[in-house]
């Protein structure tokens, strides 16, 4: 077998042409598609990482807002409890004052009734004493003694200043 240089050269030229055509027709478009795909994948990964970072930020904000809302709710509840306690104390104090006023009013009424009853009883006792004295005097004293006693009582009553 003989090596022919023109055939080798022709093979080299054919191979170069094939290589040139394949490079232009297949290799460059495939590389271009692969680069674009790689670029899209990178962009997708970057976007996903950004989304994950934003999601974490949003979660942190949610947690902070939830904490703040709970804190505010607790403060509002405590304030309302204080207000309710204060209002309850005011209501109790008002009720005590009203009860005291009503009690004093009732005591005055009872005291007045007691005085009226006292006057009535004194009057009754005086009537009873007078009747009793009259019966005793008429049974034990004579008429002349009775007149002396009446004059004596009238003069002592005249000396009393009202």
Image: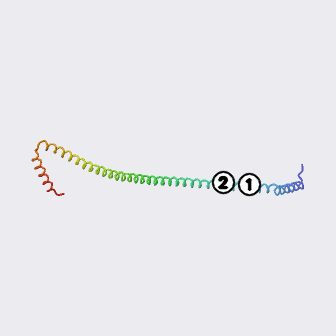
Badge 1 is on which residue?
A: 37
**Way the structure is coloured:** rainbow
**In the image, residue 72 lies at what x, y percent?**
50, 55
**In the image, residue 93 lies at what x, y percent?**
38, 53
Residue in the image at 14% along x and 53% along y: 154
Image depth: mark 2 or mark 1 in front: 2
Q: Is residue 2 left or right of residue 79?
A: right
Viewer-proximal residue, 111 or 139? 139
Question: Residue 48 has which mark?
Answer: 2
> Residue placed farthest to the top in the image?
139
Crowd tier of the residue under label 2, counting other residues whose Cα lies within 10 Å: few below 14, some 14–19, many 20 or above = few
Q: Quadrant of the C terminus?
A: bottom left
**In the image, residue 109 lies at what x, y percent?**
31, 51
Residue in the image at 41% along x and 52% along y: 91
**In the image, residue 43 lies at what x, y percent?**
69, 56
Viewer-proximal residue, 113 or 88? 113
Callout 1 secondary element: helix
Q: Earlier in the sequence, mark 2 or mark 1?
A: 1
Callout 2 secondary element: helix
Viewer-proximal residue, 13 or 60? 60
Viewer-proximal residue, 94 or 115? 115
């Amino acid at each position: 077998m003989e090596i022919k240089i023109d055939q080798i050269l022709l093979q080299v030229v054919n191979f170069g042409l094939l290589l040139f055509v394949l490079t232009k027709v297949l290799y460059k478009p495939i590389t271009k598609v692969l680069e674009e795909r790689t670029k899209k994948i990178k962009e997708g990964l970057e976007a996903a990482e950004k989304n994950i970072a934003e999601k974490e930020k949003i979660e942190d904000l949610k947690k902070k807002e939830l904490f703040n809302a709970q804190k505010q709710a607790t403060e509002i509840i405590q304030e309302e409890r204080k207000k309710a306690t204060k209002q309850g104390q005011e209501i109790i104090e008002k009720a005590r004052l009203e009860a005291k006023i009503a009690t004093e009013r009732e005591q005055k009424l009872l005291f007045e009734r007691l005085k009226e009853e006292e006057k009535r009883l004194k009057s009754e006792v005086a009537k009873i004493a007078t009747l009793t004295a009259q019966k005793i005097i008429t049974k034990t004293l004579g008429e002349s003694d009775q007149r002396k006693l009446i004059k004596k009582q009238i003069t002592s009553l005249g000396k009393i200043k009202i």
